[in-house]
Amino acid sequence: MKFDLLTTLMAYLIVDAVFAIAFAVTVRRHPNLVGPGWWLAACMAFFTGFLGICLRGVIPDIVSIVVANALILAGGVCVWIGIRGFFGLRRHRSLFVWFILPAALLLGFYMTVLPSVSARQIVMSAFVILIGVFTIRDIVRHRSLSLLMETNLLIGFLAAETLIHLIRVIIVMLSPTPVGSYILSPEQPDRVFFMLLFITGTARLLIMVTLVSARLQDELNYLATQDSLTQLPNRRFLLERLKHSIDVERRDGKQLALLMLDLDRFKAVNDSLGHAAGDELLQQVAGRIQKRLRDVDMVARLGGDEFIVLLEDIAHSEDAARVAKEIVAELSRPFHLPGCNEAGHEPGREVQIGASIGISLYPQHGDNPELLMEQADTAMYEAKQAGRGCFAYFSEELTIAVRKRIALEDRLRRGIEQQELRVFYQPQIDIASGRIVGAEALVRWQCPTEGLIAPINFIPIAEETGLIIAIGEWVLRETCRQGQCWMADGFLPLTLAVNVSTQQFRRCDINALVAGVLAETGFPSGQLELEMTESGLMDNQDKAVEVLNNLRAQGIRLAIDDFGTGYSSLAYLKRFPLDVLKIDKSFIDDIPHLQDDMEITATIIAMGHILGFKVMAEGVETQEQLDFLRNKGCDAYQGYFASKPVAAEKFAELLRAQHKNGHSLSTKSTKNISML
């Protein structure tokens, strides 16, 4: 019975030796793994310290008490430093000075100057408690989610050790240990304490080994799915992600794009400057590509100088081309390779490379990962044959169409900057009097190379790219400026209608914009009419009501454009403060030949009047259509029967002709203007 404590300490020695061997093997096989090296040092310190305690009475007390206990504390500090390094924190070697030196001095003081077993026990436990608390704090602040279970267990056993030492301090303070008590004494006051610490200490070491094993497994998994040079996903990870993405897009009815990218002139850089320079170049390429992608997109390295980009949930086929074009432009800029000469004679060089990109689309070009990658690879070689530094779709027809569309987008951007846009005005005629009461402002693009480009050819691109916001602002300002000029020229007041795009309504402060333009141009707010589509208003009805009310408070007239083609709900007509309903051209086209359209048109006119709106018909082209609208009580119309959209000068001629003919627009005048 009197050797129970000694037996526990001997077990400590065996356990420390076994774990020291385990950590030594880990350090040898994985020298870059931070943590096990310090834990090996901790096991060696524990082993030496417990061996000194076991030899109490055989070796001098200064060694078995002061040195042995200082070594045990040093082992605790090594565990702490190793844990900090394992979780990526700075490893403070100064901790040995702050903890070990004061502890050794206090132990020496209570052994020689003021002998007290209880004081030495309290000193040891107090320092162990401090080390435990700081270690737990560091783990809690910086633990890894991937190792959450292991770190929680480690925290638990460290907390148990700390608690045991706290209990020991309390017990020793309440019942001091006799001065002559030591390891071979019959009382064995620390027997239970050491047995509990043996259990928790062994469990802690097991958890530390488990942590190392889990970290190594994570690294193996990472290496299995990541490219070690660029830290990008590799082919295996890409195929898994692509398969999942295809399943998602198939379920949601959406499309994705795969961009196969091969670097141009990379081999020349690699051969002339060395593999180190080539590796640095690949890392910089990976970084530049990632900067051009959304968070939901992914770039992977297939090997060599080949990369592949996965674009999920793209709205249009040309979206992939835009990304490809940006990547080609980004990789065409010079790269600086610091210290690229392997002999070390040159500090660095600038190199110029390029990229060729092949694009395949799901579901157009394939419905499985292997086929999509094969098609993208084929398209990439087509891009190389086309001259490098460009992109190509797997479909030649699609490549041509998208390149034309991208070129048109570039020209449109330049056209906006170079003020190539024009505002044309289509007269709005009061049916009862036959006089011009207003005009709708319609944008046209006067391209220097292609002449006048119709809105149908560039407005969709402007909406997709967000250019519509800049265009809409310019049209509003130009229309108000022109309206003010006509007033200054003595023409009667006209209502000028300007279309507000859905994006403009959603993304900019339309109230502030209108107020600013009116203040800048001096155009009366009561003569400005804003036309909005049904879909633009219905997306966020509460916000729409607020915006429309603010516009109405400025005196702006509000019209619903293309009525009848969208929601056409009486509920929203009652909610929104509108002035005008514009009947869509599609209902007017077949009058008087299609009875259904005649009935729908008559119903819209009647309903609009009941709700207090003015009703205007769009796209009137024949006398029969005008007669029908007049009979049904329609208020106004616009269309080629009166005049096609014309430039401001031609519209002024219409106004002069109307004034000359007695404040009404004659049929002869409209026909003459329509031919312009």
Image (spheres, grey):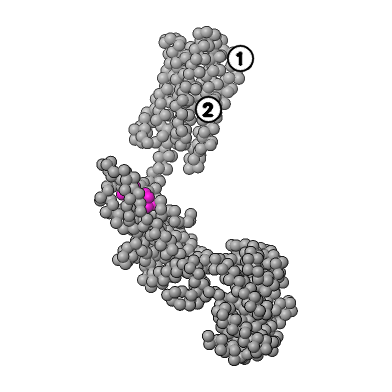
Percent of width and height locating residue 617: 63, 82
Percent of width and height locating residue 81: 46, 29
Separation of marks 2 and 1 at Cα, in angstroms: 24 Å
- Choose between 601 and 236: the one closer to the eye: 601
Percent of width and height locating residue 176: 59, 13
Q: Is residue 283 magenta?
A: yes
Helix, strand or loop for disc 1: loop
Image disc number at residue 175: 1
Q: Which residues are magenta?
A: 278-286
The residue at the point 55 percent across, 79 percent down is 647
Would residue 653 appear left or right of 76 to someone viewing this image? right
Would you place residue 121 above or below residue 23 in this image? above
Give the overall secondary structure of the magenta segment. Answer: helix
The tally of labels here is 2
Percent of width and height locating residue 266: 30, 54
The residue at the point 71 percent across, 66 percent down is 553
Residue under numbered circle 2:
132
The residue at the point 56 percent across, 82 percent down is 650
Residue 594 seen in the current view: no
Q: Which class describes the residues within 10 Å of circle 1: few (<14), some (14-19), or many (20+)?
A: few
Image disc number at residue 603: none
The residue at the point 58 percent across, 23 percent down is 166
Q: Residue furthest front?
A: 489
